[in-house]
Image: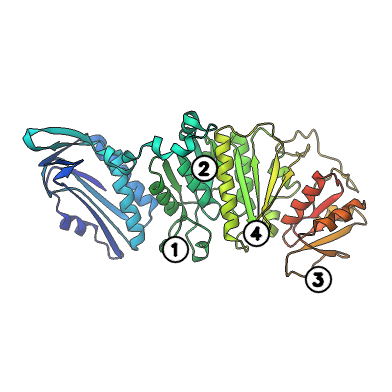
Amino acid sequence: MFELTGQPIDSTALRARLARPDAGACVVFEGWVRNHHAGKPVSRLEYEAFDELARFEGEAITSEAEQEHPGCTVLCVHRTGSLGIGELAVWIGVVSPHRHAAFLACRQVIEEIKRRLPVWKKEHHSGNLAEWVNCTTESVAGRLAPENYYARQASLPEVGAAGQARLAEASVLVVGAGGLGCPAALYLATSGVGRLTLADAGKVEVSNLHRQILFTADDVGAAKATVAAARLRAQNPLVKIEAHASDVTPANVRALVTGRTAVLDCTDNFATRFLLHDACRSAGVPLVSAAVYRFEGELNVFRPDAPGCLHCLWSGRAPGELEAVANCAGAPVFGPAVGVLGVLQAAETLKLILDLVPPRNPPATRLVNLLDLSTQAIERPADPACPVCGNPVSAPPQRTDLPDSAPVVLTAEQLAALGPVRIVALLEPGETLDASTAPAAAMALPMGDLVSVRELAAQGGPLVLTCRHGLRSAALARLFRAEGFRRIYSLGGG
């Protein structure tokens, strides 16, 4: 609720209007007329507003705060006319079941009122001198000069004033405000991306706090997207931060993706990953995707006009099938690993906006291992028969065997079609081979023993790698394919 009034503000009466039996907190902001400004003495103020526009914008601001902070009720009253020293010029009250949401909503309304409300004030000084002041210049954003905020970044020859302007015009969607999305969104916001939307239906949990750097213990139970957006607005009020505190679904994905400069996939499930990939490709928007397991992560940049898409990467595997065996939600994770991958996602996105990535670079999956600080680039070849980025003329004929160009990741049926094969189970430290679930005749090797795997591959014949979840074995199989070992595979599902 928003109101303009020419009468003195009665704070007691306003608090009574907000009373709710379920409210456990009431946060109030009172803006008083002070006797000085910018080093000059002030005797009184006059406020003038464009009434209809001010009421419309004020109502929009309070409604946005209530939407982004569920459970909050907001009331803002702004004075007009002549005010003496000590009088209330602005009163904002927020009630909610919990104090933290009320604090966040109240701060949001304060800053948005200062930034957006069409209200001017005339300061009266001694000697009958007076001057009009635009209230928006007194907001946090009004006190920040972009040329100072972005000075160190804009001084890079690859960025400059023109590049900074491109960032300000960019619109980026970050799906997932978790371990990847928090650092990615933070660096995109502070780099000056003009419009940044965070989409996440989740709420902050205690187990999130060790790696999701935009949240504190006080945020537990609050909507991730809403809290993260508030943090980023405080970090950089020069950019527009939006919260979409609900799932990305087939019904809304196209509206969320269309018109974006780039989209970041910071999710932990294959269903959303494929949904975003296909929507971005259809809308002509680049997708920057990352995934992390334990100490390792992988990074992919999918350009809408380039072959080697997500379907090529997981050829022949449906999202639901992958979801059953390779969902990262709840998996063990090293906090700095998601931080590093999230920062890399932000870096790749900024490079796309600034056109710092040569378009002819062959698509590749980048692997990062924080245990030994190793990095690997594995070529991401296109599947000519890919239904999304390829040009299949007809359905490929059924085969009883597999050629050297067969997909890297095999199903159990495709594995059976290979005939006699050698199977290598790649084990994590402390892990042992489970004879009850391991493929027959599988031999075990440590996950990091690439020398032995390379020697086995050099002996010829099909070699199939497998691991617990099927992710690392698929990545290593692609690596060895890139080295020229054409008959090395990974067993899907681990």
Mark 4 touches mark 2? (CB < 8 Å): no
Q: Report how far apart the C-alphas of labels 2 and 3 lie in the structure.
A: 44 Å
Q: Secondary structure at mark 1?
A: loop
The spot of residue 438 in percent (x, y) is 81, 66
Q: Amino acid at mark 2?
A: Leu
Rendered image quadrant of residue 139 = top left
Looking at this view, is 131 or 231 the one in front?
131
Looking at this view, is 276 or 210 the one in front?
210
Q: Amino acid at mark 4?
A: Phe
Q: Report how far apart the C-alphas of labels 1 and 2 lie in the structure.
A: 24 Å
Residue identified by numbered label 1: 220
Mark in the foreground, 3 or 1: 1
Rendered image quadrant of residue 423 = bottom right
Q: Secondary structure at mark 4?
A: loop
Q: Residues within 10 Å of mark 4 (few under 14, many from 20)?
A: some
Residue identified by numbered label 2: 173
Q: Residue at x 40, y 63 (%)?
A: 218
Mark in the foreground, 4 or 2: 4
Q: Amino acid at mark 3?
A: Ser
Looking at this view, is 254 or 6 the one in front?
6
Q: Report how far apart the C-alphas of labels 3 and 1 lie in the structure.
A: 41 Å
Left/right of residue 295 with respect to residue 110 in the rendered view: right
Residue identified by numbered label 4: 295
